[in-house]
Amino acid sequence: MGYQERKKSILKILDKRENMEVQEIADALDISAVTIRRDLQLMAEEELLIRTHGGAMKAPPKHPFTAFTDKANVAATRKKHIGQLAATLVKPGDTIFLDCGSTVFAMCSYLKDIQPLRVVTNSLPVAAAFMDIPGIQVNIAGGEMDGSRKAVHGTKAIEHIKSYHADKAFIGTDGLSVQHGLSAHSEKEAGISMAMAGSANKLYVLCDSSKIGKDSYMKYAPLSIMTALVTDKELSAEQLEGLQGKKVKVMK
């Protein structure tokens, strides 16, 4: 049975039980626990389920507009390249903030071999990605659950983040322009971004080129707040010139 067939079978099982242990799934499919454990990790990265300690649970239903999984599929190749580049900035022993952006989530698969590592996040997919990796310690912010973004937001989450210090913060953004700086879809997302920025030595903003030159609903920070912008090779020469005119360091 190939991975695609196993994936369908696992999802059918979780439709009935919602939460199962690795060995239970392995017994049901007559497949080794090692293979099932690997499949569950891949499926968690695809946002098809949520990894739990020793097993998996059914992922919550998608939100029709801003579901994290839908955002993750937009410009997926660009986000993968940005995530890979951003991961090169992380060193063993670092403490890092990772927000709930889908571009930031693309870093996770490239961080797994960088150990030891401390990760402070408000993202459930980020927390799940590192759950079974002993060398990576995860600290997840407490607060109000945002089902559509699969993240934790609110005053308590901001206070939680502010109580820690990180070497580096990696955040996404919904808009970035020379005229208006960084912008977000909502106040709650802007609040998390600012909390991470204010509690880290360095701030890296991960943004694919399709969002550069555009503004979202709420302006929350000037470009000068960034240590560097991490983007993709599709950034135009005109956009690059404008950013460099604002003394923004661009990695692409």
Image: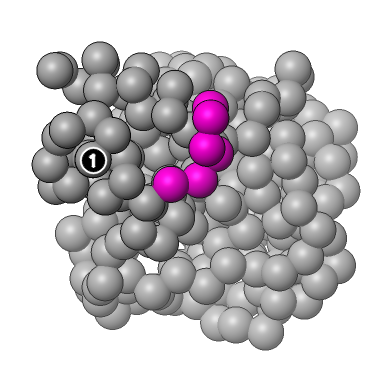
Amino acid, disc 1: Asp
- In magenta stretch: residue 18: yes
Q: Which residues are magenta?
A: 15-20
Observer-nearest of 216 and 13? 13
Q: Position of residue 85 (x, y in %)?
A: 30, 43
Q: Position of residue 136 (x, y in %)?
A: 32, 70
- In magenta stretch: residue 19: yes
The number of numbered discs placed on residues in the rendered structure image is 1
Q: Is residue 160 above or below residue 5?
A: below
Location of mark 1 (residue): 27
Task: Determine if residue 113 is in view.
Answer: yes
Quadrant assignment for the N terminus: top left
Q: Position of residue 40 (x, y in %)?
A: 32, 40
Quadrant assignment for the C terminus: top left
Observer-nearest of 5 and 137? 5
Observer-nearest of 190 and 146? 146
Observer-nearest of 201 and 193? 193
Q: Position of residue 55 (x, y in %)?
A: 38, 51
Residue at x 12% of width, y 41% of height:
32
Q: Quadrant of residue 219?
A: top right
